[in-house]
Amino acid sequence: MSLLPTGDIGSSAFKKCTSLNKISAPYFRIIHNHAFEGCSALTEIDFPKVVEIKTGAFSNCSSLSKVIMPICAKMANDAFNSVSTLTYLDIGLSSIPNIFSS
């Protein structure tokens, strides 16, 4: 799925959307609280311009394995809560918070 530019992805925008599997969105800057929570089929995300990820944005995305956000500067501690499948993580943070915490 490719998303058209609007600036931010709102809170709970795609929450529990089980049909999403890959997302490429080159225009978004902020991903708000729980935006993709529970998207169980989501395997790959590519957000090259995202600078901030808020609370629980990708929590319970049980198939997520690849994350690309090379300029992300701020991430909530629990952005990827209950995600244990990541094999590739490209983010711009100089230090990674405990993004998998509950």
Image: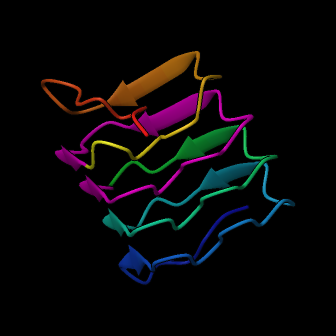
Magenta-colored segment: predominant secondary structure: loop
Question: Which quarter of the image is occupied by the C terminus?
Answer: top left
Count of picture labels: 0
Residue occupying image coordinates x 39% and y 67%: 28
Q: Of residues 52 and 84, which is closer to you in this image?
A: 84
Q: Where is residue 55 in the image (x, y as percent from the top left)?
A: 36, 58
Q: Which residue lies furthest to the right in this view?
A: 19
Magenta range: 50-75
Q: Does the magenta stretch include residue 16?
A: no
Q: Which residue lies furthest to the bottom in this view?
A: 6
Q: Is residue 74 left or right of 20 when viewed as pictured? A: left
Residue occupying image coordinates x 66% and y 64%: 2
In the rendered view, would you say 53 is above or below 94? below
Q: Which residue lies furthest to the top in this view?
A: 87
Image quadrant in which you'd find residue 62: top right
Q: Of residues 89 and 32, which is closer to you in this image?
A: 32
Q: Where is residue 19 in the image (x, y as percent from the top left)?
A: 87, 60
